Image (cartoon, rainbow, N blue to C red):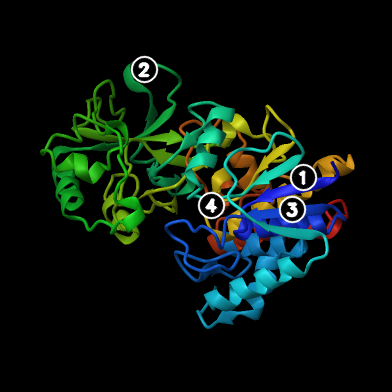
Amino acid sequence: MNKITVIGAGLAGCEAALAAARHGVKVDLVDMKPGKHSPAHKSNLFAELVCSNSLKAARVDSAAGLLKAEMRKFGSVCLDSADKSSVAAGGALAVDRDKFSEYITETVRSDPNVNVISKTVEKIPDDGVTVIATGPLTDEKLAKSIEDYCGQSSLSFYDAAAPIVSAEGIDMDIAFCASRYGDGEGDYINCPMNKAEYEAFYEALISAETAPLHDIDRDINVYEGCMPIEVLAKRGNDSVRFGPMKPVGLRDPRTGHRPWAAVQLRRENAGGTLYNLVGFQTNLKFGEQQRVFSMIPGLKNAQFVRYGVMHRNTFINSPALLLSDLSLKKNGKVFFAGQLSGVEGYMESAASGIVAGINAARRILGVKPLVLPHFTMIGALIGYITDSTVKDFQPMGANFGILPPLDTAVKDKRERYMALSKRSLDYYENTGEIL
């Protein structure tokens, strides 16, 4: 069957449909609107923006800006629409939500290779090439079908995640590498606290302001192992010191003693450029996370590439399930894109849709898949969510921490980011393979 089915007309689904259509492939774009809406969506338009009208930074020496610059190389409909519907927002790219969605809807509906079908899909299609891009509020029956098809541990229905910091912002004159009781090869970075430091941190933690939950998030049942650390802390002064901050089995090489408490950082990616704060799932406001968690010794100048979040969010365990072309390992005709695939953010979702659409078309046309190098932002993002070494997977957005380092170290951060962006964009300029 020389046709692709794209399920979901959000940002990722629209990009996937049009990317495939540009390859001359016929596309059925299936969306449950207008017959049915998710709890977060109100409009009948495609690519509806829910949480914010900001698409983040525009400058190319930022991770978000580099992502957009790469997407423009592929003729992104979302960026085309954003340019036509932009509103003043300083250095960020922000849009008029209605105009943004109207333009994308019109573009999709007017494409001769795209056939829009309004219906609710309840299971993964049995045949043909399919791109599933149904978003973080995937319909319950389809979510159950995905879970049954991929395995019971394949799907997360909430996102209770700990912050992730860049390795370069960790002060190793204070922190030290070690595993509990000397097991392993110093797999964790440990941030030790004395009693006074712990008590100051504890008071700041229990008094910090939490983010309000939306109505659709209020019924989240977070199991004990993913309890927000600020909630655990309120059980008593020593609750976190006997929990995720327990110092048992650790010895600070600078003092020769066990610290009063310790925060462990676990490697988040194979390159060791990102670290997760172990056990620090949180619902604190982002500014509060920056303030409170920077009190941890060794993290005073930490660069948070992802703040902790707690909200309803359906996403697959993509490192275990997906190949680097965004197809399922068990069925190369089924592709995933958008937040369901494990990326986080509007533009990240759209970018994954572009790649999934191209590779779905290439699957039908018998052409080798597009796999971008990891020194590009899109390549690094997809490389991260399909990296089988990533454990306890949580969704990831664009950030410079997921890119491999430059061959030559650049100390100035702004200059380093510009060099990373140039390396990526030079690739697009010098190869015709992707177009």
Q: Which residue does the numbered mark 3 point to in the structure image? A: 28
Q: Residue furthest bottom?
A: 88
Callouts 4 and 3 close, C-beta under 8 Å = no
Which of discs 3 and 1 lies nearer the camera? The answer is: 3
The residue type indicated by label 4 comes to Gly
Picture quarter containing residue 68? bottom right
First in residue order: circle 2 vs circle 3? 3
- Asked whether residue 426 is in view, the answer is no
Can you tell which mark lies on residue 360? 1
Q: What whole-number distance in Å separates the C-alpha atoms at marks 4 and 1?
A: 23 Å
Q: Residue furthest left?
A: 236
Which of the 4 image quadrants contains residue 145? top right
**Residue annotated with mark 2:** 182
- Residue depth check, mark 2 versus mark 1: number of the one nearer the observer: 1
Figure check: 105 above or below 236: below
x, y (%) of residue 23? 85, 55
Q: Is residue 413 above or below residue 408?
A: below
Three-letter code for the amino acid on which mark 2 is drawn: Gly
For marks 2 and 1 on the same chain, the one whose residue lies earlier in the sequence: 2
The local secondary structure at tag 4 comes to loop
